[in-house]
Image: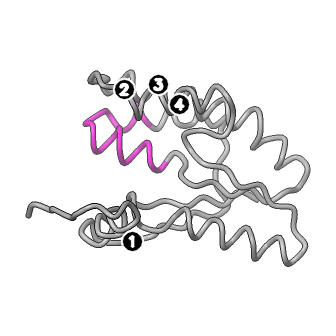
Amino acid sequence: MLITFEGIDGAGKTTQVKLLKEYLTEKGHEVVLLREPGGVAIAEKIRALVLESKEDINPISELLLFSASRAALIKQLVLPALEKKAIVILDRFYDSTTAYQGYGRGLDLEIVNQINRIASFGLEPNLTIYLDLSPEDAMSRKFAEKSLPLALGK
């Protein structure tokens, strides 16, 4: 079973995936908890490259880099775990790519969806949990975590 969590930064995904893993593990299930982008060495390098880059990465390059990260994670960890009947919980999956690179960066959604299917080897979640939180509340949480002052423009 594949369970994915989606939502904007600060919505509480990381907290909720940890709580779900703890609950399912206590119930005797084998659970694998992973994040996107990341999870395997090459995916972590791609994550760092994209998220820490000082230069502007064009939308297509960004889409392909995140997709390469996903393909590595799915092939190396997710599919083998699912074959062993583990429950896999992902903190983000391709819905984030659709939101950020498709809607956010203005890429053609048909192309984004095709690349998502390829990078995920056709894998679809059994359940996606979307954590809905206002951007203001999410930013308040993120800044509270880092003890930084909050400044939001309206």
Q: Main secondary structure of the magenta part?
A: helix
Residue type, label 4? Ser
Residue segment shown in magenta: 95-112
Residues at marks 3 and 4 touching, judged by CB atoms closer than 8 Å: yes
Mark 1 or mark 4: name the one nearer the start of the chain.
4
Where residue 47 appears, as percent x and y from the top left, is 51, 33
Q: Name the outermost residue toward the front.
A: 147
Other residues around mark 3 within 10 Å, as few (<14) / some (14–19) / many (≥20)? some
Where residue 36 appears, as percent x and y from the top left, is 56, 44
Residue depicted at 91% across the width and 50% down the height = 84
Residues at marks 2 and 1 touching, judged by CB atoms closer than 8 Å: no
Residue depicted at 41% across the width and 35% down the height = 51
Query: Which residue is disc 1 drawn over?
Result: 132
Mark 2 or mark 3: name the one nearer the start of the chain.
2
Query: Which residue is disc 2 drawn over?
Result: 53
In the rendered image, the quadrant that contains the C terminus is: bottom left
Query: Which residue is disc 3 drawn over?
Result: 64
Other residues around mark 2 within 10 Å, as few (<14) / some (14–19) / many (≥20)? few
Q: Is residue 94 above or below residue 68?
A: below
How far apart in space, not on screen, are marks 1 and 4 (Cα)? 24 Å
Residue type, label 1? Asp
Q: Secondary structure at mark 2?
A: loop
Q: Residue 33 or 110: which is nearer the viewer?
A: 33
Residue depicted at 75% across the width and 77% down the height = 23
Magenta stretch: includes residue 109: yes
- Looking at the image, residue 16 sits to the left or right of residue 98; the answer is right
Other residues around mark 1 within 10 Å, as few (<14) / some (14–19) / many (≥20)? few
Quarter where residue 109 is shown: top left
Query: Which residue is disc 4 drawn over?
Result: 67
Mark 3 or mark 1: name the one nearer the start of the chain.
3
Residue type, label 2? Ser
